[in-house]
Image (spheres, rainbow, N blue to C red):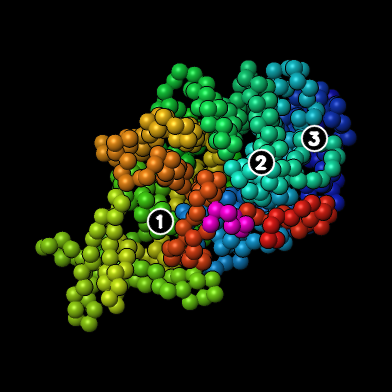
Amino acid sequence: MRELKKIFTIICITGLVAACNLDYFPSDESTAGALRDSYNGLVYATDGNYSMFKDPLEYKGTTSSSYSYLRRQYEMAEYPSDEIVVSGRTTSTLFQAYTYERNASLQNVSYVWWSGYKIIYGANFVIDAIENGTSEKLDYLKGENLFLRAIVHLQLVNLYAKPYSYGRENPGIVIRNSSVIQNTERASVGEVYDQIEKDLTDAIKLMQHGTRRGNAGYASKEAAQGLLTRVYLHMGKYQEVIDLVDEMLDGATAESKLESTGNFPNYFKNALNSKETLWAVAMTTYDSQGQSNIGSMYLNDGIGWGEVFSSDPMNDLYEKNPNDIRYGFVLPQYLDETKWMIRYPMPGTDYRDARSNNIIDVQKDLTNQFYFMDDNNQKITIQTENVEGYTKHFIMLNGIKTQVRLTKKMQHRNSFPLYYITKYSYQDGDPMLSSPVMIRWAEVILNRAEAYANIPGKESNALADVNIIRNRAGLSGNQLFSTSNMQGYNNVLDVVLEERHLELAFEGHRTLDVYRNKKNLNREYAGVHTWEIINYNDNKVIYPIPFDEISVSGIVQNPDY
């Protein structure tokens, strides 16, 4: 058989996305049937599917380095959270996600839907070309594509539909499980999750006897199992989560699957070759998009934008235990470590009630070890209190007790101190490069912890899993949890969710973790977003179906859009 070329022609009506007929024709006119007999050709096609996660794709006749499914999907998942602060208005699509701007014609809303289904169609092409049991290698390759199809369906349903916990019958997304032209209609959330579960269980079976084709940038049986624990958790199948994690461990300890405390600070820059990584989107120096990489917004270091920082709530949580090594992924930029300052949010002045900081230099009384500021030659002491395990600072401002943040003197942008984030930096020494981790063992252990937390009588098991993660973070003694040492938390589920917040910060989990547990998201902190608490049942917590899709296929739109 002639060597298949990597280039495929995509037949598609402009604007038609989920309903689009993405038939793949290898440029030498080989058919899917011929491809079935060419392992190398199917490897080519599969590697192309992996590439579509990260590569800029031509979209509506335009090519841009920012047209990446990985980047745009990440922005839509992470930026509406309480983990980050955007330090100024920008025309970037990340700002729309961050400020909960929800419009069916927005580029990020349309592009992620379009590119997501493009990946799904690519996976379907390979899946349909391979008959089960043809060979171990082909079975494994088919399993990889089932995994890719599952994770994209999961990411899309979590963006464009209400969480599974709100009800199986809510409108979901369009299911595409074949390369054959199908009717375009929204399945229910439950039907979408059922399809994802089936794809992952099938993938696990097909990959159980093979070997991963390379580093953690390739899917594997373990990656599919890890993703399935997430799916089961979302579905409330708690015992299934526990059983599957136990099966994955196969008698090994959870600790043995994690990077050590000593190695963890370098984990994300070496994620592709780490035992902790179950699947990451593999990036190389060749793939780097420089200022269009995810890390460019979180870090400057001579090339990045460095305009999105770790938020005050996030830093408060880390500073509760300053020896937590996970705080090392946040890099505060000090102007002078011998001087101090306080800051507090100013009243909102624009239509969105966004709030900047008032920054005031303070001094330290070295004799009595307290901080103070001068106001018209009057010494005002910075008061300290312990509030729910946190050290909080206050001043009396116009007779009102006002909370402030006390730090060493820091650089700031538009009054927002620079707390750089490094989870997406320094792979191969490149400040902007990383291979973003999609699934890792720490999440899997925390999935089991949350499952235990939802089963009466399993509270100690949940806390034991949390302590595994905290131990790795360098915490010990009273910093660990037990049913007699809850450290101010009301229940074990809150402990687990807070630990997910600490461990999985900036990795795209937080917003869904809050809303799927029917909790509200507190964004009452300084930033160019609205000062508000977002109710979990507010319709803006999900994105609208793109206008391009609605206008062609006529599928039902989400509420309020």
Labelled pair 3, 2 in contact (Cβ < 8 Å): no
Q: Is residue 239 visible to the viewer in this orientation of the structure?
A: yes
Q: Which mark is residue 313?
A: 1
Image coordinates of residue 100 in percent, x first then y, are 58, 61
Q: Nearer the viewer, mark 1 or mark 2?
A: 2
Q: Is residue 210 magenta?
A: no
Query: In which quarter of the view is residue 281 placed?
Result: top right
Of all residues shown, which one is farthest toward the bottom?
A: 376
Q: Is residue 286 visible to the viewer in this orientation of the structure?
A: no
> Where is 347 relative to 250, above or below?
below
Question: Which residue matches tag 2?
Answer: 168
**Image quadrant where one finds the C terminus:** bottom right
Mark 1 and mark 2 lie on one chain; the one further toward the N terminus is 2
Image coordinates of residue 10 in percent, x first then y, are 82, 44
> Where is 330 relative to 145, above or below?
below
Q: Which mark is residue 178?
A: 3
Give me the C-alpha separation between circle 3 and circle 1: 44 Å
Q: Which residues are magenta?
A: 535-541
Of all residues shown, which one is farthest toward the left?
A: 367
380 relative position to 500: left or right: left
Secondary structure under tag 2 reads loop
**Image quadrant where one finds the N terminus:** top right
Mark 3 and mark 1 lie on one chain; the one further toward the N terminus is 3
Residue closer to the observer: 126 or 513: 513
